Amino acid sequence: MNARKISELQNNIFMIAGHGSSSHSYVVKGDRLNLLIDSGLDGNFYSLQEGLLNIGLKVRDINIVINTHEHFDHIGANRYFQEHAIIAAHRFAATKIAMNDRYVTLYKSGDANELSLYVHVWLESKSRFDLGNYTLDIIHTPGHTSGSICIYEPIKKFLFTGDTLFAGGTLSYIAESGSVGDYINSIMSLNTRQIVEIYPGHGEISANPGEDIKAALENARQFLNKNEEVTITYENDLNIIHKKN
């Protein structure tokens, strides 16, 4: 079992870093409830459990799990939380999770006692979670997938971005239910907000969201430009778009 790197990003907000193809998991220790953003890969659950213990929580201390979208590397360990915690996802992601749509979610645990995944709360844009010490607003940001969301803290102005926005503006692949046009519109919408830090689903956190947004828009527009040759390569478990020289 590989121990995950743990960082305290804000007071009582922790990143438990993913390894391999797993997403990062973020924990918000609330005054009222404890919240987990993305459970990561099924196979990495035990390192997630160890990470929780290192910040003073047991698995059953998590009250809410929010999935930023429906892909297996973000939802895989939901099954270890869903009997005691509320699982929440945008309604477009929830449909695919609840209907066991493995073509879209790419989910396959391989566990002999595998349980179906389900969602208790189907979110809409502008849904809000009030944890007492932090308020988290849901922003529907389709593009990478139809059910992608970002989660915004309006007082501290940080943003959990899932696979919508990465440090450096790296463009993740546009998945089966996604759309480049939707992606550009979502990034433009994020650009209307004050954001001081982004906490993405993979890679490094960023204190330069304005530059990241600018780069993400440029990468997406190049992808749409038929006269611009691009290649898609597989790096760090993400399909990354590069401009050809």
Image (cartoon, rainbow, N blue to C red):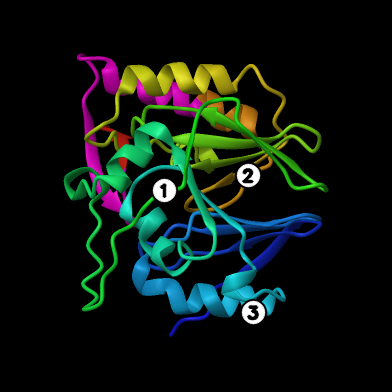
- The residue stretch that appears in magenta: 215-239
The residue tagged 2 is 206
- The residue at 50%/23% (across/down) is 187
The residue tagged 1 is 119
Against 102, residue 163 (above or below) is above
Q: Earlier in the sequence, mark 1 or mark 3?
A: 3
Judged by depth in the image, the label closer to the viewer, 1 or 3, is 1
The residue tagged 3 is 53
Residue 51 is one of the magenta-drawn residues: no
Say which element carries label 1.
loop
Task: Report the amino acid beneath label 2.
Answer: Ser
Quadrant holding the C terminus: top left
Q: Are marks 3 and 2 in contact (CB under 8 Å)?
A: no
Say which element carries label 2.
loop
Gap in angstroms between the C-alphas marked 1 and 2: 30 Å
Q: Nearer the viewer, residue 119 or 26?
A: 119
Q: Which mark is residue 105?
A: none
